Structure formats: structure tokens, C-alpha cells
Amino acid sequence: MSTPNTASVLTGALSVVLAAALWGTSGLSGKALTEVAAAHPLAIGFYRLAIAGPILLLAVLAGPGPGALRVPRRHWPAFAVLALSQALYQALYFTAVTEIGVSLATLIALCGAPVLITLLAACLLREKVTGTVVTGVAIAVAGAALLVGPVEEGEAGGAVPVVGLAAAAAAALCYAVFALQARAIAPHYPVTVLVAVAFSLGAAMLLPIGIVAGMGIEGPPLAVGALLAYLGLGATALAYALFFAGVRRLTATLSGVLVLAEPLTAAVLAWIVFGEVLGPAGLAGAGLLLLAVGVLTRASARTAG
């Protein structure tokens, strides 16, 4: 029979895995929107933030209350960085999904981010670089090389999808900046506030650029509406709510390992729905990237402890 503590951990783990699985479907939703409605990546990123942001703000009002949204002027630059990095991440990630597919874009963007966080923290925040960290980064570099290698061999006339690979790598960098800035300001605000404000301001930042690029989405209204609603509500707002509910019951190491369900979900569903196949070298690279994230997560938890 499970003890209350065991039951709590299991509930938390289930919440985090479900959140990661929902996040893993965001790339598929974005790709479906490009195929069904010829939606521009900027438009997809905008609608995702514009739907999820207000919903999360309502959750803040219902939870911590309006007072949690009072941001002193000295923190405005930090929130601007959070919003800009999140806006750029969405635009770059969905661009990468369009150019190189869901599996590869998600693996590079999501698994590359923890590696970049580790490197940026060492360079900018003078965090200690241990042997475990060096090992994790080395494994990640090897995994990335294996992932990109088969792509460079090229299925489309030998052409290298430079735009897609660069967008995925830049998305990883934006996510790393978002995570580091959130870590720096987190002691002053609930995490829900950081995400809600960042998403809402990020949508506002994407709007003028999106209007120039083309915000219109053509296609069957019912299908387009369902995809947008799912992307904003299910794959984003609900996913974050589940994650915040679950992570409070878990250690940092376990949470970091469980969120690996995101790239795994994206890869499996992309294979089933769109027929995306990484191949033997790509699968080996994906495995090394996932291993690297696990190693770096464990190292980070030890340092924090």
C-alpha cells in the first residue's frame, strides 16, 4: 500500500509527464496549422502566446491575486527580457518545425537549451564547472553532431537546411536566456506570474511583426479554430498548470528527467502522424542528447543542494 508521501510523488510525477507530453504536441499543432491553413510561423507563435497568456493571467488573479502582478520599475527590464526571449523562441521554434520537421526541431531546441544554460551560467554567472558538467556538454555536442549529420547528407538534392537548423539552435539560446532570467528574478514572484506576464507581453511584441509578415490564417474554420485552441489552451496553458502543480512535489533532478517526455512525445508523434524518421544516426544522436540533459540536470541538482 502506498504511503501518503509516495502517493504525492506519484501524483506529481504524473502531472509533470502529462505536461511534458502536452508540450511535445505543440510542434505537431504548429506543423498542422502550416499544412491545413498555410499559417506563418510568426502567426502561430503569436496566437499561442495570445491565447495562453491571458488564461494564465486569470489563473494568477484566481490564485496569488492581483497584488502578484504589481511589478516595480526596477524589474521592468527583467520582464522585458523574459517577454522578448519567449516571443523569439516561439517564432524561431515554429520556423524550425516548418523547415526541418517536428522531431529534429524539438530535439535541438529543447535538448540544446539545458546545455546552453549550463554554458551561459558558467560564463556569465561564474557557476562552477565540474567534471560531470564537462562530460554532459561533450555528450550533447556528440549527439548534436549525429543529429545534424544525416540532415547534411540531404534528402532534398543534397541541400543543407541551414535556416531550419539555425532557427532551432537560436530557439535553444532564447529558451536558455528565458530560463536564466527567470531563475534570477524568481525569488521575487511566483513562477506562474513570470510565465503569464512573459507570454502576454511576448504576444504584444510579436503582433506588429506578425502583421507585417502576415497574421491571416486561411483554411477550414473549424479545423483551424480547434488547432489554435488546442495549441494555446491544451499544449500551453493546461501544460504549464499541470507542470506547476506537479513540480512542487518532486526533486529538481526527477523533474528534469521527467520533462524529457516532451522531445520523446514529439519524435514519436511526428513519426506516426507525419512519417518523420530520424534514422539510425539520428536516433543515436537523440539518445545522446537526452542522456546529456539527464547528466546536466543531475549536476545542477547537486550544485543547488
Image (tube, helix red, strand yellow):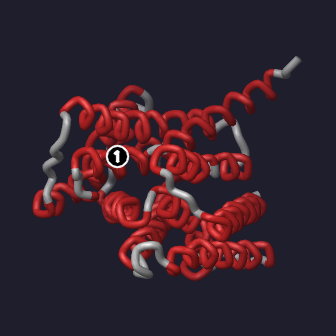
From the viewer's side, name the closer residue of 151 and 247. 151
Secondary element at tag 1:
helix
The crowding category of the residue bearing disc 1, from other C-alpha atoms within 10 Å (few below 14, some 14 to 19, many at least 20), is some
Q: Amino acid at mark 1?
A: Ala
Q: State the image coordinates of residue 80 (x, y, percent, origin top left).
A: 31, 62
Q: Residue at left 27%, top 44%?
A: 36
| Residue 304 shows in this picture | no
Please, is residue 65 above or below residue 301 in the view?
above
From the viewer's side, name the closer residue of 182 and 261. 261
From the viewer's side, name the closer residue of 72 and 44. 44
Q: Residue at left 50%, top 50%?
A: 270
- Residue furthest to the front in view is 157
Q: State the image coordinates of residue 292 (x, y, percent, origin top left).
A: 70, 67
Q: Residue at left 66%, top 63%?
A: 283
Please, is residue 92 above or below residue 252 in the view?
below
Residue that carries the numbered disc 1 in the rendered image: 32
| Residue 92 shows in this picture | yes
Q: State the image coordinates of residue 53 (x, y, percent, origin top left).
A: 32, 42
Q: Residue at left 61%, top 39%?
A: 16
Please, is residue 173 above or below residue 91 in the view?
below
Q: State the image coordinates of residue 2 (x, y, percent, origin top left).
A: 85, 21
Quadrant placement of the N terminus: top right
- Residue furthest to the left in view is 212
From the viewer's side, name the closer residue of 28 and 65. 28
Please, is residue 128 above or below residue 240 in the view?
below
Quadrant hosting residue 168: bottom left
Instruction: Locate residue 154 relative to residue 31 in the image: left or right.
Output: right
Instruction: Locate residue 243 relative to residue 295 in the image: left or right.
Output: left
